Image (cartoon, coloured by chain):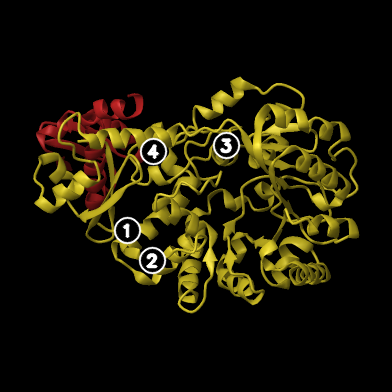
Chain colours: A red, B yellow
Amino acid sequence: MIVPIDQSLLEVAGSAIARLKVVYPELRFETEYEGIAISGENVEERVNEITKSVMNVLYQEKIFRDTLDIRKRIYLG
Amino acid sequence: MSPFRFRDIGEDKTLVVNEVREFGMFERGIVPRILNGNLSVGEERKLRDLKVLLSCIDDWRLTALASKARSNTRKRSGRISYMLIIPTLRCDLNCSYCQVSRASENAVGYDLKPEHIGLLDAFWNEHAGGKMKIEFQGGEPSLRPDLLSEIIKKAEDHFDQVEFAICTNLMNITPELEEIFANPRMHISTSIDGPTNMMAVNRTGTTAGAEKFFENLTYLIKKHGSEKISALPTIPERAYENIEEIIDFYRKLGLSSIFLRPVNYMGFARKRHSSSIDSTDRWNEAYFRALNKIMEINKSEFFEEFYASMIFQKILGSTGTNYVDCRSPNMYFDDYCVVDYDGSIYPTDEARMLSRTKQVDLKLGELGGPIDEEKLSALNLNSMNEVHPDCIHCAYGPFCGVDLVDDLSRYGRIDIPKNETAFCKRHIGLFDLIFEKIAARDRDWLDPLMTWAFRKNGAHAPFEILYD
């Protein structure tokens, strides 16, 4: 199964996959041109749940990366 | 854009939280709309109010955000203002869930020595300020009223402002204890697990023992009034299905508050209640059922559940809640510590339990000696969810806490993924429940929660303050 993602999220796909592997140790995640490929047992039966998790983790990583400078200013001055 | 966290709530809402506990409820899909710049006028205004969207790098909103965030994370007092003192580890009961692995009533060598009490002044001079609350824990502290009196006198001479609490099983009320209880600065705390049968099974061992407890409790309430006495249950897994009975029993006793707590996975409880290591889902199910009942009760009378009330106050932005098992930063030996029966100093009550069961030595030092700064730093470096990799993305992080000692007790380590810990599961469940009620504007829940939160200062805020 492939979760299609916007090109702007591809830059954070690596860190997102690192986190997803912790949450879903039984699944395999790989970056493809058109999105994140996921394989493993019963993936097709859990499409909605997994897709939601993948997108949430990607958004979190994107927000984190895009706000790092501001975060430093907030906490370090 | 400034840092923000999000979480889907209910069917169609998404919660957006900034770094300083301010939040807003948005229509689902708000996050990609923020990232793509595809917002409605209303959403954009709301996100600017939340300080998530900034006009420029010098936006005053960023200064306000930074100022609040820094004051939240740097609020170390460096002065101990709450101390637990264990006059004795001996106890005359044998509760199945005892967290501290107490010593038997006649054991020798488990009481605080006079020389330890002599060292308290020097300890307070070095580590405390002008205000102090001392809580006597055990074992059963009432077995040594002489030591209690001595410490109370010393503290009253030392501090400008001092309060005391004694956590006692109320099995024996001697004239010496009566004198201690009568001190207006003394508060009495005890355990009531439910009606006589539950008390006998969990605590006293016999029905006669449980009856004696209730006789003593009734006597004290009559003599001092119910405000001087607080009670809380410890609920083993076998009692989850009867949790409503416990609530009814508290009301029957005339109590208007309850703190529903599962068994703590510490001490004897590790062996006798081994399933409590991971009974969080079952606990949450029972706890939420209990909260539903309590909200029904609140339609006709005031009856508070302490933990939900405390969590809701955090959501409202209160900085007055300083519950040590759910706060962040949770710096150890900052404003709170424990002095054990042998003069050892621990960062928390649970830390002394882990040391006693020889899982991990969290002793920080002894009265009269130095504090182990290296050990303290190792703990404190991991005591901020604000910088913990598993918590920095969590929408509930700003309202939540960190409890390393609980992680150590259950898993023997602090680096397992936070989302797999009992602490995280318990709190995510409760935050989800409360934010679902906020999203649904559920007055049956929000009115009691607001009443509990604002009860103390007499003011009443309408539930609308939760919305923009």
Q: Residue A31 occupies which quadrant of the picture?
A: top left
Label 4, label 1: how many angstroms apart (C-alpha)?
24 Å
Same chain for mark 3 and mark 2? The answer is yes
Residue under label 4: B391
Q: In percent of the image, x 85 and y 43: which residue is there?
A: B150
Q: For numbered disc 4, what is the local secondary structure?
A: loop
Q: Earlier in the sequence, mark 1 or mark 3?
A: 3
Nearer the viewer's eye, disc 4 or disc 2? 2
In this rendered view, identify the residue nearer to me: B351 or B270: B351
Reading the image, the residue beneath label 2 is B446
Q: The disc labelled 1 sits on which kind of residue? A: Leu
Coordinates of residue B60 in the picture (x, y in percent): 23, 35
- Pinpoint the chain carrying mark 3: B
Foreground pick, B55 / A65: B55
Sequence order check, earlier mark of 4 and 1:
4
Q: Which residue is mark 1?
A: B466
Q: Earlier in the sequence, mark 4 or mark 2?
A: 4
Using residue B260 as the reference point, say whether residue B433 is left or right of it: left
